[in-house]
Amino acid sequence: MKLSSVERKIIENSIRDIKDFPKPGIIFKDITTLLNDKEAYGILMNHLYLKYKEYNLDYIAGIDARGFIFGASLAQMLGLGFVPIRKKGKLPYTTISEKYSLEYGIDEIEVHIDAFSNIPHARVLIIDDLIATGGTANAVATLVKQAGAECVEACFIIGLNFLDGIKNLKEKTDVYTLIEVN
Ligand code: AMP
């Protein structure tokens, strides 16, 4: 089910741009204003529900931390389990982890080793608020596979088209972005 141009505009207009956060030169896409706007949040979640109910999914995997908000809401609407993919050191049970490069340095993301184990070859949708370089989402797609599941698609509310993140991630899985920033 496609979003109408009016619906897309309502979602787009609800996202706030914060210049020079967290450092000079970055325009931070603030989705707290989207969450605060019941019409925009409702249109967004309804759209994701109608789209993904056709996918025969087993789990939604949300990326730390804003992916938890959209992912947990969507999992509940679809009647699916939710899996949090967290920054290193936050998950209490045995984990598997994947390192990825940042502009300066390295970060690491983790999932519980048994997160998808109740369903053999579980079909998983990854979700986050935004894809920039794609480093985080690429590492998450690798982790999902290592955990024995299949990454069916990666979904982002916002895609930064001027970076290569979407193109690179498409080599690994299908990618869906609602709002594209050029
Ligand atoms: P990347 O790994 O470069 O694709 O970065 C994606 C992660 O960083 C996501 O979890 C985003 O929430 C966050 N992020 C990166 N750039 C921005 C931005 N301009 N505005 C908001 N969040 C961002």
Image (cartoon, rainbow, N blue to C red):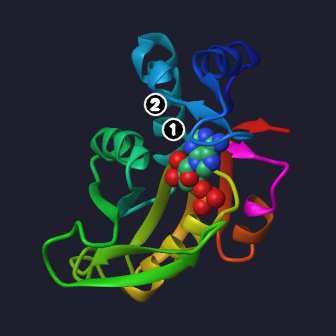
Q: Position of residue 67 (x, y in %)?
A: 43, 48
- Residue 164: in magenta span: yes
Q: Give the extent of the magenta segment.
A: 159-165
Q: Position of residue 94 (x, y in %)?
A: 18, 84
Does the residue tagged 2 have its C-beta within 8 Å of any atom of ligand 1?
Answer: no
> For the residues marked 2 and 1, what is the alpha-carbon distance in whole angstroms?
5 Å
Residue labelled with disc 2: 45
Q: Position of residue 141 (x, y in %)?
A: 53, 74
Instruction: Report the label total.
Output: 2
Give me the disc on residue 48. 1
**Dot 1: element:** helix
- 157 to 18, vertically: above or below: below
- 48 to 150, vertically: above or below: above
Going 35% across and 75% down the picture, which residue do you hit? 110
Mark 2: few, some, or many residues within 10 Å (few <14, many ≥20)? some
Amino acid type, callout 2: Met
Identity of the residue furthest to the front in this view: 24
- 79 to 143, vertically: above or below: above
Where is residue 2, by image quadrant? top right
Amino acid type, callout 1: Leu
Q: Are marks 2 and 1 in contact (CB under 8 Å)?
A: yes
Q: Position of residue 83 (x, y in %)?
A: 30, 62
